[in-house]
């Protein structure tokens, strides 16, 4: 479900950019961008999952995501 949601969001973002700039993104480009996003986020966020498991937590909320993003210099 997460992969589908990321793909949908990337597609919407490409549509928005396309409307503004007059560019059309192919399905293959959107799929490649979605896959790259999943790989980058997977590497970034999976490295921080041990913090949540250490705290015996089962739910990650928006504040947790913001904390991970702040700690990542690439973001």
Image: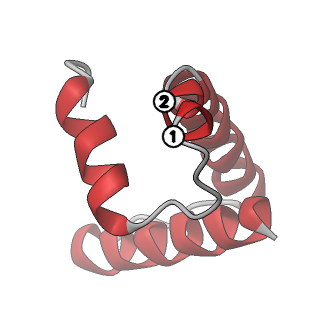
Residue 39, label in figure:
none
Q: Nearer the viewer, residue 48 or 13?
A: 48
Badge 2 crowding class, 10 Å Cα cut-off, few under 14, some 14 to 19, many 20 or more, is few
To which residue does mark 1 refer?
55
Considering the numbered disc 2 on the image, is that residue within a helix, a strand or a loop? helix
To which residue does mark 2 refer?
51
Q: Can you say which quadrant of the picture contains the C terminus?
A: top left
Residue 6 position in % (x across, y down): 62, 63
Q: Is residue 35 left or right of residue 65?
A: right
Vertical order, 51 against 55 (above or below): above
Kindly report which numbered mark, 1 or 2, lies closer to the viewer in this rendering: 1
Name which residue lies at 22% across and 26% down: 71
Vertical order, 25 against 55 (above or below): below
Residue 20 position in % (x across, y down): 23, 76
Tell me how far mark 1 sits from mark 2, CA to CA: 6 Å
Residue 37 position in % (x across, y down): 57, 41
Quarter of the figure with residue 19: bottom left
- Confirm or deny contact between disc 1 and disc 2 (CB under 8 A): yes
Vertical order, 8 against 44 (above or below): below
Quarter of the figure with residue 10: bottom right
């Amino acid at each position: 479900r997460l992969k589908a949601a990321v793909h949908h969001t990337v597609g919407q973002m490409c549509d928005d950019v396309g409307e503004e700039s007059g560019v059309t993104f192919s399905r293959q480009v959107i799929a490649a961008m979605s896959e790259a996003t999943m790989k980058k986020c997977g590497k970034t966020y999976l490295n921080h999952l041990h913090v949540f498991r250490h705290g015996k937590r089962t739910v990650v909320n928006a504040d947790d995501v913001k904390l991970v993003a702040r700690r990542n210099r690439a973001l």
